[in-house]
Amino acid sequence: MSGTEYFEILNEDGSLTGILKERSLVHRDGDLHGASHIWVICREGEKLWILLQKRSEEKDSYPGCFDVSAAGHLDPGESFLDGALRELGEELGLNAKPAELIYFQQKKIDQLECFHGTQFHNRELISSFIYEMKEKKENFCFQREEISEVLWTEAGELRKRLTDGSMKHCIDETEYAHLCTLVLSKSVASFTAM
């Protein structure tokens, strides 16, 4: 399987099927598969900062768009938490421990788009996590083939830019609103096994 990326197809309830399928075929056929989103945050006094990544122009979906801090599809047999930890390391060079990630939601999406002249049917079950940094790190070892830049944005400013259209993005605004509500109300619970 070297050189080609394979996803494990999920049942509608999110359980593993054991069926592996090549990435482009999964997105062609709209097969349900798993992904993890990780929101890297930092609090400075009353301000909440969110780290965003700008997707490479070479990405097969949403090229050149700002996105969550780190995100990625699950490897076959991988849990959502393990996928989140792996993506943080691969995309941003952050080596987090399982207890440092806070799970806050799971959602299913079904999107039909066209990128680079090809239909892209994305059916994903996504688990979202928060990773809080004590200070805003500026130098990230990010994965150049995946990400063209990273950017810290103040939470209120980001909300404004998402709604006024001044930022090209692929961020789910309801996911972002949920993140802010939880973090700003300090009601985020510790991760529990899924």
Image (tube, rainbow, N blue to C red):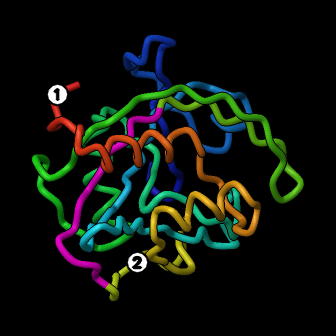
Query: With 74 as the anchor, is 103 left or right in this view?
Result: left
Q: Assign a secondary structure to mark 2.
A: loop
Quadrant position of residue 76: top left
Q: Verify whether residue 132 appears in magenta.
A: yes
Answer whether residue 61 is visible to the viewer in this image: no
Mark carried by residue 193: 1
Q: Assign a secondary structure to mark 1.
A: loop
Query: With 70 as the anchor, is 101 left or right in this view?
Result: left
Where 132 sits versus 64, above or below? above
Answer whether residue 23 is visible to the viewer in this image: yes
Near mark 2 (Cα within 10 A), the count class, few <14, some 14-19 or many ≥20, is many
Residue reaching furthest to the bottom:
139
Quadrant position of residue 48: bottom left
Where 110 sits versus 186, above or below? above
Q: Which residues are magenta?
A: 126-137
Give the quadrant of the C terminus.
top left
Q: Residue at x 32, y 63 (%)?
A: 41
Q: Residue at x 29, y 55 (%)?
A: 86
Q: Nearer the viewer, residue 92 or 154?
A: 154
Q: Residue at x 53, y 52 (%)?
A: 4
Q: Residue at x 65, y 54 (%)?
A: 170
- Give the mark nearest the N terminus, 1 or 2: 2
Q: Nearer the viewer, residue 42 or 5?
A: 42
Q: Which residue is mark 2?
A: 142
Where 70 sits versus 75, above or below? below
Q: Verify whether residue 165 appears in magenta.
A: no
Q: Nearer the viewer, residue 10 or 177?
A: 177
Q: Which amino acid type is marked by label 1?
A: Ala
Q: Which amino acid type is marked by label 2?
A: Phe
Q: CA distance from mark 1 to mark 2?
A: 28 Å
